Amino acid sequence: MNLSTKALLTALALTATGAAAENITISIENTMGDDSFFFTPFWIGVHDGSFDTYNGGESSSIEMTNLAEIGNTAPLSDLFSASAAGLAGGVQTTATAVASAGDAPVFSPGESTVFNLDIGDSTINRYFSYASMVVPSNDLFIANGNPMAHMIFDAAGNFTGPVVIEIYGREVNDNGTEVNSAVNDAAFSTNDGQALPESVFIRDFFTNPDDTGYLDSFLGSTTANGATIGATFGADDLIARITITPAPSSIAMLGGLGLVGLRRRR
């Protein structure tokens, strides 16, 4: 992060202090290199801190399994709507990245999206959650297991950001419901084969000696949108970044002060 970016983020934070902001701008980036892995549409939730998407070391829910195996956010969205957090006024959305007409709504390497979200009552909806599948894979996903990991508003409803969530390879999870095999019906891969069910607990990826080899086995394979996997990622590689800032009105005001705005790097 360069000095101008740091200055802008600091200024945004100072501007938001003391204001019970109810609108935020969310940027989601796939930071992996060319020809690497993709992310399915991101489920995003802003809530009271009570909605827990998963617990490592336990069996996955059917809702998270749908996301981890096929990238389907609908069951998780339904679960959120019926939860205490949803009934308390929590808000959610599914974020996609479409570069051009006809493009798959996935986050390709280097691709990003920016959107605004009205989060309602910021004294209640103070915490940010996300979830997305890593593709191609059998059941790898990223999400925050701690529902209070990312506080974006304090108890008085004041915005605490900008909040930058950097996601590394070591934060990828194995859902434990499908055997890791590139040739056994890995989602969004053109490889043939039949999926092999598995019934083990959710675990941190890269904790099994075979995990690196599993990713390597996708090299040279083709994805459903016609891309060829030519690179993988490691535990210490930055694979995604989520940035949460005040609504555009705050940014516009900073622009009037002559501050330089953020721009997409690639």
Image (cartoon, rainbow, N blue to C red):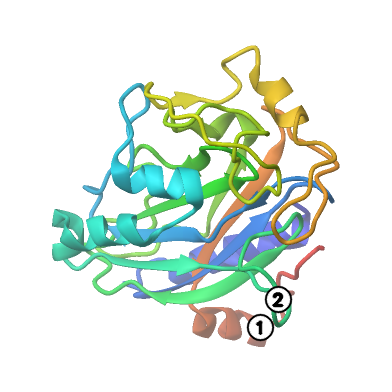
Q: Label 1: how many residues lie within 10 Å, few (<14), some (14-19) or many (20+)?
A: few
State the residue in front, 141 or 65: 65
Find disc 2 in the rendering and name its residue.
259
Image location of residue 75, percent across then percent down: 31, 57
Residue 153 appears in which quarter of the rendering? Answer: bottom left
Residue 103 appears in which quarter of the rendering? Answer: bottom right
Vertical order, 124 against 49 (above or below): below
Residue 234 appears in which quarter of the rendering? Answer: top right
Vertical order, 263 against 175 (above or below): below
Q: Amino acid at mark 1?
A: Gly
Q: Label 2: how many residues lie within 10 Å, few (<14), some (14-19) or many (20+)?
A: some
Residue 153 seen: no
Pointer 2 and pointer 1: residues touching (CB < 8 Å)? yes
Image location of residue 230, percent across then percent down: 86, 42
Q: Residue at x 80, y 45 (%)?
A: 229
Residue 159's tag is none
Vertical order, 261 against 172 (above or below): below
